Image (tube, rainbow, N blue to C red):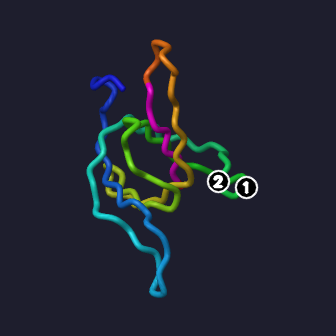
Amino acid sequence: MPRFLLRHTVVVEPFLGNSSTGPLYGPAAEVRGLLEQQTRLVRNAAGEQVTSSSTLRAPLETVAPAKSRVQLPDGRKTTVIAAVRQDGGGLPVPNHLEVQLL
């Protein structure tokens, strides 16, 4: 993904799984990407339609599985609905990870 598109910084705590005391998260990491705050319908991992409030387009190496916690630049905290790889397969388009947020 071209550096000039990485306009926003968010903090991602990747979801690692559940324990007897609740969800487990990895260490917080700053991720630069392009944040689009627009409401739209998306499908979650179970195939259900849910409302997404924002979409982050980040480098492909970003680790942000479903249920990860994300803090947006304005301080709002949200959760990852799904993360979808957008790989152009050699075409001249930006490869990125599309992270759909609650």
Packing grade of label 2 (10 A; few <14, some 14-19, many >=20) is: some
Quick check: 58 left or right of 43?
Answer: left
Q: Residue furthest top?
A: 92
The quadrant where residue 12 appears: bottom left
Q: Does residue 25 lie above or below 4 as drawn?
A: below
The dominant secondary structure in magenta is: strand
Q: Residue at x 58, y 44 (%)?
A: 39
**Residue 50 magenta-highlighted:** no
In the rendered structure, find residue 44 and report the number of the disc placed on it.
Answer: 2
Q: Which residue is labeled 1 in the image?
A: 48
Give the amino acid at mark 1.
Answer: Glu
48 lies left or right of 23:
right
Which residue shows up at 35% across the image and 37% down it? Answer: 33
Amino acid identity at mark 2: Asn
Secondary structure at badge 2 equals loop
Q: Quadrant of the N terminus?
A: top left
